[in-house]
Structures are given as C-alpha cells and as structure tokens.
Image: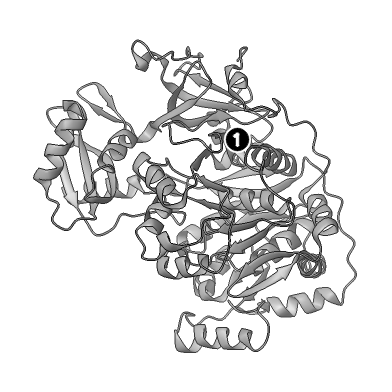
Amino acid sequence: MGNKVWLDSYPSGMPAEIGASPFSSLPDLLEDTIRRFGDKPAFHNLGHSISFNELDRLSRDFAAFLHGLRGIAHGDRIAIMLPNLLQYPVVLFGILRAGLTVVNVNPLYTARELEAQLKDSGAKAIIILENFARILQEVLPNTPLEHVISTQIGDLLPVPKRWIVNFVVKRVKKMVPEWHIDDAVPLLTALKRGAASEFRPFKTGRADIAFLQYTGGTTGVAKGAMLTHHNMLANLEQTSLWISGSFKEGREIAIAPLPMYHIFCLTSTLAFMKWGSLTVLITNPRDLPAFVEELGHWKFSVLTGVNTLFNGLMNTPGFDRLDFSALKVVVGGGASVQKPVAERWQKITGTFLTEAYGLTETSPGVCCTLLGTPWNGTVGLPVSSTEVSIRDEAFNELPLWNGEGDIARHTGEICVFGPQVMRGYWNNAEETAKIIERGWLKTGDVGHMDDKGYITITDRKKDMILVSGFNVYPNEIESIVMMHPGVAECAVIGVPDKRSGEAVKLIIVKKDPTLNKEDVINYCKTQLTGYKRPLHIDFRDSLPKTPVGKILRRELRDENQQAAG
C-alpha cells in the first residue's frame, strides 16, 4: 500500500516505525528486565509473589535441568500444559533460556486434541499439571514425548501453604484423577537437579523459533504458527509503544485473567514485564465472584480481557464497588468489544476500553484504538511498522471508504504485512501458501478501511451468512441485540433455509427472565432491515466458548445441524 493514511491519524509522538530491537532474543530481554528490576515482584498467584530475581533463579535452574535431559538439542520443542500458575513463567523462561521452543498446550484439550498437537509439534518433553496427567497417560504411547515433568497447583507456594493447597486439591476436592506415568519427574525435583547443575545457555538468535503457537483447533485441524524471537520482540515493541504512554517503571500492577498459553495474554504479559510491572495471574477467571474478590486486593492499573469477560465482571455483585482510581489501560481483544459493554464499562470504571485486533499468526498485535477514546465500532489503526490492506478474492486492493456509496465495494479480506507476521505453519507448506501471499498474511477476517486509516471488522469470512444473495454479518446483529436490556449474551449463526438459502438464527442468554421471542422480534424490527432479522430465536442458559471467552459459533452450527438430522 503506497499511501499509509493511518499515519496522519497517529497521536503525537507515535513513531511510524519501531526500529531494530536492542535484544537478540526473549532471554536477552528477560536478563535486562532482571538487571533493572531484580528485587521488584514479578508475578503473583494464589496469595504469593515471586520477584524478578526469583524468576531468574528458578528459570535458570529449570533451563539447566532441561540441558541435562538425554536427547534434548537446541531448537527442540517443549510443551507446557498449565493454567495460570507461578510455574508458568518459570518453565516458559526456562525453556527459552535453554535455547528450546515453547509449545503452549490448552489444559482443557481432549485426549484426541492433545495427541494431535504433540505429534504435530514433535515435542520431546512436557510440563503438565497433574490434574491433567490422566489425559496425557492415555495418549503418551502414541506421542514422541521422551520426558514428562509434573507439577501440583501449590508447588511454588511457601511451606506450609504448599502442602495445604496440594492436599486440599488432591484429597479434599478430589480434582486430580488417578494417574501413573513411568519416570515422570516432579517439577520441584527438576528444579533441585537444575540448581546443582552447571548451566551454559545456548546463544539464541532472532531467527530462531520461540513459540509454536497452535491455532485453528476450533475450526478444523490445529496448525502451529512459527513465531520467532524477532516476531515476538517486534510485537512487544509495537504493542507497548501503543499502550504504555502513562506507565511508570516498576510501579504498574497488571491483572492477567486470560490464560498464558493464549497468544494475547502471553504477549501482553511480556510487554508489561518490560516495565517491571507486577502481573497478577488469575487461575480461574470463570469463577467471577472469586475474581472480583481478588481484584479487591489490588490498586491495579492494567487489565486485559475479552468482551464476554468484561460483561461477566460487570454483572457480578461487588464489581462496581472496586477501587478503579489507579486503572490506566484496559485492553479488549480476542473478539469484538460490543458497544453496550464498552459504554457500561466506562460508566462503572471511568476508563475507556481500548480495543485491539490481532491473530496468533501476527504474534498477535495488528491494530489498536487510541487510548482514552470512546468506542467507535472500529479496531483502530495499524500499529507502528505494520501495513494493512483490504483485498478482494483476486488479491486486488480495494479502495478506502469515505462514508459514501455502497460499502460492499470497499469490503474485503483484511491482509497484514509487518515484522510480527509468523514465518509460516510448522511442517505445513500447503496451509502456509494458502494464508501468506507475497509476504502478506490473509487473515480470513472481512472488513473495510476508511480514509483516516481506521479499520472496521465486519466478520470472519466463514461466519458470513448469505440470505437471498445479501451478505449478513453475525457481529452486526449480535451488537444490536446486546443493546436490549433483557439480553446477557447472544450469538448468531446461519442455518439452511429452502426459500432464502440461509436464514439468521439468534441464540440468547437472558438477563431478564421474562424476555420472550415476541419481545426480541419486535425489537429487531426497529433495528434491522428485513433480511438481517432473525427467523429463528432460541434461549439457553449458556453459550459455548473458547478458554479465553470467544463464543464458538462453529459449535452452535454443528449442534443445529445434528438437531436437524
């Protein structure tokens, strides 16, 4: 794209380009952070904090342990299957410092999904919470794993709290199914062995793969995005430039409710670390009352989340009485932030929701709205050193939209070019060729760009509904329906229809128990043109979601198809 119109909309002082990173790898960044903030608390979880110096020692010990394992060589893949616990940053940085590649694994995976990811990645070892070890035991013989390191929830808590937590989880709450894996090494044993071992770190370069970050598991076969140290360092710089204008070194408190195995939380956490921030890891954000209670212990300044999480927090008793006086930045990603959620959030907290857009394949940050601005329906502007182009099916660039005429002529696939774009999919040249063309990443998201450079996402290409030849985008309808005071959550899918090809189906979780179909139909008549109105309306108690809270439309479509026979 020749004319980078978005640069004219940049805030004063925001550079067009990020320049070269002073670090050659993520471990280099960690070492610099430790040097500057060693005694400061780095991570907090379950009532206990570890400092950057403790993170340095523990991750060094784990790296030394990995170096001592047979068959482990530079660049090998090591899997992590943990929720947000203090163990996560320790083993994450231990793997990276050992010159190895992190394979983040969703702890909620089924045996089939786990086996597929371990096979595809060729992971040599895994660090797993013993709560999930039974699943691993089922598939272990079918995987390339040579080493298993197990941990219990309380392992990095001080004694006697460690013993109490582990006893309650295992014996009282019975949250650990019986399991047995020969030669599995407890993490605490691994750390002791590493502490007694010499450690000579591999020299890792920018081109080395830092993460195999899997994506697409909910929409087909999961693929491993190869994210290099260069990709990650670039995106850390891009995103931190955008959101950290008011940050003070060593003084910010960031709340991390999204799982660290997800790219959004992972990169956000690394970005906050650059400032010597304390990151509070939330192990189970779905327990909203407990989450709100935890928030009450902190004068937090940064929070990341997704639309459904923000909505859930605001509907939880006590949230509106929290102390928001230190809150500076709230970033929503993973799915569109809806207008009623953004407006209510600002009213309760006094802070605007900043909407970010990105993908696993872009490490993830691509666009962001300006800090301190109200919801405007866009995902903002491309971040520094990033180009965004709207393309048609033949990969021709479409014109910018000036607010007049048929918007469909300006709507196409959002494509991204920049240093954060992945190298490709692991061992999958065919899928890589489908998504990367001439260095541009084809995102699969549909939208348009206006003449100021602001980008609006209409929907995912695969979620678009075709009603009598008209394009209908679920995001638009969901945003409208969410404005109804009787609706807590909703989702829209397309279903087969003999007359129109497809019809709109709306699934609602009620806020007002008296809400009925007639109320919804009458409301939609005032807000939506005929072909966009839902023909089918269902009510249910909950909606299927990913671990980060993104609504799974595919699962809803599958359910509808099965019900139809």
Which residue is drawn at the image coordinates 32% and 50% (left, top)? Answer: 555
The percent coordinates of residue 234 (x first, y second) are 71, 38
Is 514 displayed left or right of 214 in the figure?
Answer: left
Residue nearest the viewer, comparing 100 with 284: 284
Residue nearest the viewer, comparing 543 with 331: 331
Residue 66 vertical placement versus 238 (above, below): below
Considering the image in quadrants, where does the N terminus appear?
A: top right
Q: Quadrant of residue 431?
A: top right
Q: Which residue is mark 1?
A: 429
The percent coordinates of residue 247 (x first, y second) are 68, 47
Is 475 displayed left or right of 425 in the figure?
Answer: left
**What is the number of callouts on the image?**
1
Residue 250 vertical placement versus 298 (above, below): above
The percent coordinates of residue 462 (x first, y second) are 37, 34
Residue nearest the viewer, comparing 89 with 521: 521
Which residue is drawn at the image coordinates 88% and 66% (left, top)? Answer: 199
Q: Quadrant of residue 531?
A: top left
The percent coordinates of residue 208 (x first, y second) are 76, 44
Farthest residue to the left: give it: 518
Which residue is drawn at the image coordinates 31% and 36% (left, top)? Answer: 474
Farthest residue to the front: give it: 325
Which element is circle 1 on? helix
Residue 98 in view here: no
Q: What colouring style does the render use?
A: one colour
Q: Circle 1: is it few (<14), some (14-19), or many (20+) Cα within 10 Å?
A: few
Which residue is drawn at the image coordinates 47% and 15% (left, top)? Answer: 394
Residue nearest the viewer, comparing 151 with 149: 151
Residue 56 in view here: yes
Q: Amino acid at mark 1?
A: Ala
